[in-house]
Image (cartoon, grey):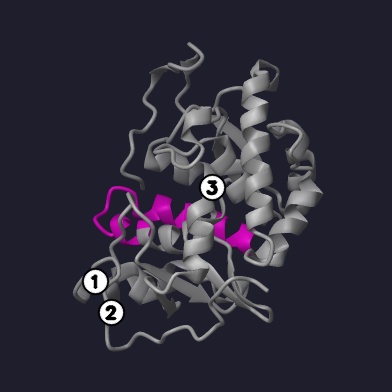
Amino acid sequence: MDAVPQALPGLDPRSGRVIPPDFLVPQEPERYTAQDHATWRTLFDRQTELLRGRVVPEYYAGLAALGITDQGIPDFAQMNEVLARATGWRVVAVPGLVPDAVFFAHLAARRFPAGYWIRSPDQLDYIEEPDVFHDVFGHVPLLMQPSYADYIAAYGRAGLAYAGQPALANLARLYWYTVEFGLMRTPEGLRIFGAGILSSAGESVYALESARPLRVVFDCERVLRTRYEIDHYQDIYFVLSGYDDLPALRPAELDAHIAAARAAPEIAAGGRIAADLPSHNNVGAPG
């Protein structure tokens, strides 16, 4: 799924714990230091201010419902009491990026794998491997939204169905351009819902206000054909009209979409095609 090192079976280098086959480890929130909580607070305060007028409204509702605040790294067990009642999801701790099959299996079972550790203070603006801030602040609040929560679980089932097949590369693009870097039209204008954007101070502004990237109306087959790059801000964003615009990922429909995408030429990240429909939402600094 991602071009950064995955955790491997053996010992977790951060804690010395044995990594089990499902890669689940205890969060042990009591082990967080004062500096860890201070780093969370710095990131949380900066991002919640930046995201005002830029993020889908359901995001802030999710933060509030789950009790995710600037008071420190959340306790997964406490969040799960609320999240499980709302959409059947739980957040589970992992030592880093996990193998694809493990990742898909957790999503299919409505378990969201989150790194339990947090970046160092000198990595506030960029970190290669997702940490607890990206995973929890970025992903978890929208799991309170039922349609989105169903989409992530369906994506996990699709990943299991395509495991080991070349088409898995196409499926990864769907996750990238929706869950990580998706935008959405709302009555108030263009808004962020992708976790890779909303956990990044720089890209939270760039995705909505820069004239450089393309912003294209979401089309499933177009997305499945489009490569992505991980080491810079995105050259293209796909814009959904709402949560109901997320593909249902029913097996027969997804098979047809992937077959059509693989029969057509691939598209470079940021490449234009004649069939693109530009998104005409207002783009600019929130008023």
Question: With respect to residue 212, does 38 lie above or below?
Answer: above
**Side of 231 where 202 appears, left or right:** right
Whole-number angstrom distance, CA of label 2 to CA of label 1: 8 Å
Q: Nearer the viewer, residue 151 or 181?
A: 181
Secondary element under disc 1, as helix, strand or loop, is loop
Residue 87: quadrant of the picture: bottom right
Residue ID for mark 2: 272
Image x and y of residue 187, in percent: 68, 81
Whole-number angstrom distance, CA of label 3 to CA of label 2: 32 Å
Residue ID for mark 3: 107
Q: Amino acid at mark 3?
A: Leu
Question: With respect to residue 153, does 97 lie above or below?
Answer: above
Please indicate, yes or no, whether residue 88 appears anywhere in the rendered image: yes
Q: Residues within 10 Å of mark 3 (few under 14, many from 20)?
A: many
Query: Magenta stretch: residue 124 in it?
Result: no
Which mark, residue 46?
Answer: none
Q: Nearer the viewer, residue 16 or 56?
A: 56
Q: Amino acid at mark 2?
A: Arg
Residue ID for mark 1: 267
Which quadrant does the C terminus fall into? bottom right
Q: Earlier in the sequence, mark 2 or mark 1?
A: 1
Q: Amino acid at mark 1?
A: Ile
Q: Which residues are magenta?
A: 148-172
Secondary element under disc 2, as helix, strand or loop, is loop
The residue mark sitting in front, 3 or 2, is 2
Please indicate, yes or no, whether residue 27 appears anywhere in the rendered image: no
Residue 176: quadrant of the picture: bottom left
**Side of 186 where 236 appears, left or right:** left
Q: Earlier in the sequence, mark 3 or mark 1?
A: 3
Image x and y of residue 10, in percent: 39, 16
Give the residue drawn at x 53%, y 59%: 204
